[in-house]
Amino acid sequence: MHFGHLLAAQDAFEQHGLDRLIIVPAAQAPLKPTEVQSPSGDRLAMLRAATEWDTRFEVSDFELRKGGVSYTIDSARHFRALYPKDDLYWVIGGDQLPQLHLWKDVAELAKLVEFIFLERPGYPVKAAQNIPGLRLHRCDGHLLAISSTELRERTRRSLSLDYFIPHKAIVYIREKGLYRDTK
């Protein structure tokens, strides 16, 4: 989780008056089959190290424990069962809106959660397909052009990660030798 993600989480939390924000790392995102580059335990540990001091954020290992492909509908059902009376929001990048109709059981998902979307640098926000009951809320956030792919490449090239991700996550990556070429 880099500072772009953390700022987006903070912006959504503040602008929409959320009581808590639960960060849920995916085991494997269905629309990004090659995205996962490190073991789930390491990703969870880095995420916890990056956010442990901030009481506004919680980290859930639900999708990692479940394993396999992570579908938002499964997590939404899980959190709806945990918090049956709460309003639930799912925070996404605005670049996901045109793909939302491809998400598994999206009609049911639209009944379980409302979506908060943030613009991502280099990805102009495009409208979502017509999904009955879809509730969208824009979040005007701080836009940082940081990508996880770029950060993995910086690590492979032994370039600094300072000012991109929290220091505790940098220390973890170095200690575990993550994202280095194994050749």
Image (cartoon, helix red, strand yellow):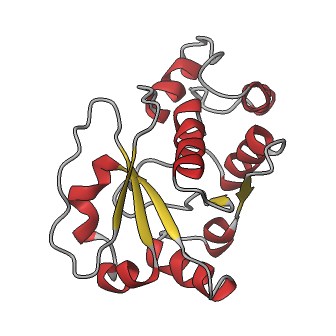
Q: Is residue 122 left or right of residue 73?
A: left
From this view, report whether residue 173 is shown above or below residue 107: above
Q: Position of residue 92 (x, y in %)?
A: 42, 54
Toward the viewer: 99 or 142?
142
Q: Position of residue 175 (x, y in %)?
A: 81, 28
From this view, report whether residue 145 is shown above or below residue 159: below
Residue farthest toward the top in the current orientation of the protein: 159
Question: On the image, which quarter does residue 46 sit in?
Answer: top right
Q: Position of residue 139 (x, y in %)?
A: 41, 47
From this view, report whether residue 131 is shown above or below residue 42: below
Please name the residue shown 44% across and 31% down the image: 147
Please name the residue shown 40% across and 40% down the image: 140
Q: Is residue 5 left or right of residue 55?
A: left
Q: How many numbered circles does the render carry? A: 0
Q: Position of residue 178 (x, y in %)?
A: 67, 33
Which quadrant holds the C terminus? Answer: top right
Question: On the image, which quarter does residue 1 sit in?
Answer: top right
From this view, report whether residue 180 is shown above or below residue 54: above
Residue farthest toward the right in the current orientation of the protein: 53
Please name the residue shown 23% across and 45% down the image: 125
